[in-house]
Image (tube, grey):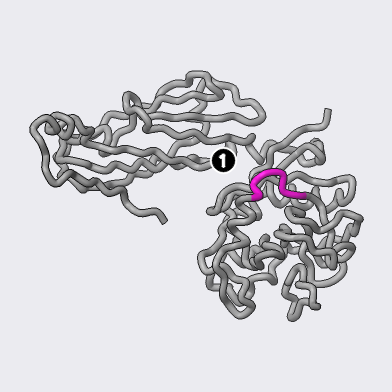
C-alpha cells in the first residue's frame, strides 16, 4: 500500500541518430565530375508535431544543411514560403520575403529555425471538420514538407454533450502517440473525470514517473511538471478525490486504470498495463484501454529506469498533450 500519501498506484504481485556521412571515391574520374557538381547545395527538412488542437500554436522546425559552398537565399535564412493544404484542399499560402541579401555559406554549415503559426493562419478560408489534416511544404523544394492532425478547439467541447463510448483521447509523448478508448458502461464517473482533465490541459507537461516493464506505466501527477519537486512525484492530485467504480474489466495489456492510495482516493493519476495483472482486478477501477499505439506503450515500458524504486525513467517520458477527439451524442 502507499505510504505518506503517495499515489503509488498498482502494486506488483508478491509471490539517436547519427549525422549522414558523405563518402567520395578514392579516385574521381573526369566523367564523375558533373555528378558532383550537380549535387544540390542544400538539404532542407521540415518537421512538425503529430497532432495539435485548433486553439494551439503550431511550431515547425526547419533544418538546413549546407552540403557544398553555396549562396543561400534570404527567404531560407529568415523568410517563409509555404504552401498549405487542409484535408487535401488548397489553402492560402504563407509567404514572407527574406530580409537582406543572400548569405554565402561553406559546406558543413547547419542551422535551424522555428516557424510558429496559429492554426487559424494555416486554415484561413477553410472550414475545419471534427478532425483535419494540414500539410505544409516549402514552395518549389521537393520533399521539404510535413503534415499533422488538428483536433477541435478543446475550449469549445462540452463534456455533457459527448458520446463517451465513442470519444477518444490521444496521449502525445516524446516516445510517440497512444490512442485511448473508454468504457463508460463500466466506470462513467472515471471516464468523465479523465476527459474533463484532458480538456482543461491538466496533463500537459506531466511525466510518466513510474515505469515497470512487464507490469505498467503510471502518470498523471501534476507535481511531475516540476523537476524540483521530484520528492513529491506520485503524491499529486487535481485537488479532489473520486469514488471507486470497481467492475469486472480485467487488467490486461493496454488497460487504462485509476491509481490510488486506498479506497476512493483516485483523482488524476492513471496507469496503463504493460502485461496482465489479475491481482489488480476488483482493486483498481479500469475505465478504458489503448486502441492504437501499443508499440509506444512497449517503448515507454522498456525505457531505462533508475531511482530509489528502480522505476523512474532515466530520460523523462513527457506527456506533452492529451488531445480529445470528441464525438457528440446524436
Q: Position of residue 248 (x, y in %)?
A: 91, 55
- Which corner quadrant holds the C terminus? top right
In the rendered image, the vertical position of residue 133 relative to residue 154, given as above or below? above
Specify whether 267 is left or right of 70: right
User: Does the magenta stretch mainly form a helix, a strand or a loop?
Assistant: strand
User: Residue at the spot x=87%, y=54% of the render?
Assistant: 249
Q: Position of residue 212 (x, y in %)?
A: 66, 68
Specify whether 113 is left or right of 128: left
User: Residue at the spot x=59%, y=49% of the render?
Assistant: 172
> Circle 1 sits on which residue?
52
User: Residue at the spot x=67%, y=62% of the render?
Assistant: 217
Instruction: State the residue in front, 95 or 248.
Output: 248
Specify whether 313 is left or right of 213: left
Find the magenta span and give its range: 289-294
Q: Position of residue 34 (x, y in %)?
A: 14, 29
User: Residue at the spot x=35%, y=27% of the render?
Assistant: 142
Instruction: State the residue in front, 94 or 269.
Output: 269
Q: How many marks?
A: 1
Which image quarter: residue 202? bottom right
Instruction: State the residue in front, 27 or 124.
Output: 27
Q: Residues within 10 Å of mark 1 (few under 14, many from 20)?
A: many
State yes or no: residue 180 in magenta: no
Amino acid at each position: 500500500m502507499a505510504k505518506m500519501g503517495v499515489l503509488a498506484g498498482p502494486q506488483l504481485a508478491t509471490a539517436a541518430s547519427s549525422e549522414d556521412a558523405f563518402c567520395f571515391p578514392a579516385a574521381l574520374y573526369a566523367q564523375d565530375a558533373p555528378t558532383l557538381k550537380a549535387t544540390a547545395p542544400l538539404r532542407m527538412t521540415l518537421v512538425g508535431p503529430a497532432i495539435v488542437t485548433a486553439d494551439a500554436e503550431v511550431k515547425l522546425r526547419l533544418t538546413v544543411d549546407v552540403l557544398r559552398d553555396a549562396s543561400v537565399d534570404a527567404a531560407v535564412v529568415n523568410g517563409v514560403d509555404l504552401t498549405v493544404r487542409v484535408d487535401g484542399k488548397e489553402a492560402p499560402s504563407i509567404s514572407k520575403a527574406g530580409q537582406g541579401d543572400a548569405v554565402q555559406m561553406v559546406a558543413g554549415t547547419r542551422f535551424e529555425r522555428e516557424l510558429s503559426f496559429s492554426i487559424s493562419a494555416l486554415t484561413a478560408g477553410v472550414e475545419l471538420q471534427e478532425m483535419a489534416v494540414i500539410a505544409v511544404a516549402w514552395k518549389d523544394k521537393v520533399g521539404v514538407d510535413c503534415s499533422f492532425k488538428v483536433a477541435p478547439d478543446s475550449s469549445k467541447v462540452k463534456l455533457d454533450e459527448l458520446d463517451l463510448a465513442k470519444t477518444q483521447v490521444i496521449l502525445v509523448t516524446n516516445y510517440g502517440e497512444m490512442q485511448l478508448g473508454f468504457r463508460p458502461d463500466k466506470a462513467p464517473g472515471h471516464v468523465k473525470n479523465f476527459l474533463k482533465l484532458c480538456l482543461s490541459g491538466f496533463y500537459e507537461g506531466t511525466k510518466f514517473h513510474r515505469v515497470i516493464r512487464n507490469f505498467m506505466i503510471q502518470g498523471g501527477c501534476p507535481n511531475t511538471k516540476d523537476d524540483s519537486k521530484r520528492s513529491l512525484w506520485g503524491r499529486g492530485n487535481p485537488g479532489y478525490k473520486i469514488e471507486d467504480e470497481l467492475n469486472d474489466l480485467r487488467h490486461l495489456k493496454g488497460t487504462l486504470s485509476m491509481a490510488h492510495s486506498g479506497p476512493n482516493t483516485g483523482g488524476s493519476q492513471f496507469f496503463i498495463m504493460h502485461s496482465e495483472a489479475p491481482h489488480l482486478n476488483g482493486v483498481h477501477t479500469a475505465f478504458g484501454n489503448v486502441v492504437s499505439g501499443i508499440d509506444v506503450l512497449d517503448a515507454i515500458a522498456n525505457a531505462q529506469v533508475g531511482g530509489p524504486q528502480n522505476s523512474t525513467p532515466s530520460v523523462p517520458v513527457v506527456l506533452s498533450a492529451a488531445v480529445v477527439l470528441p464525438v457528440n451524442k446524436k
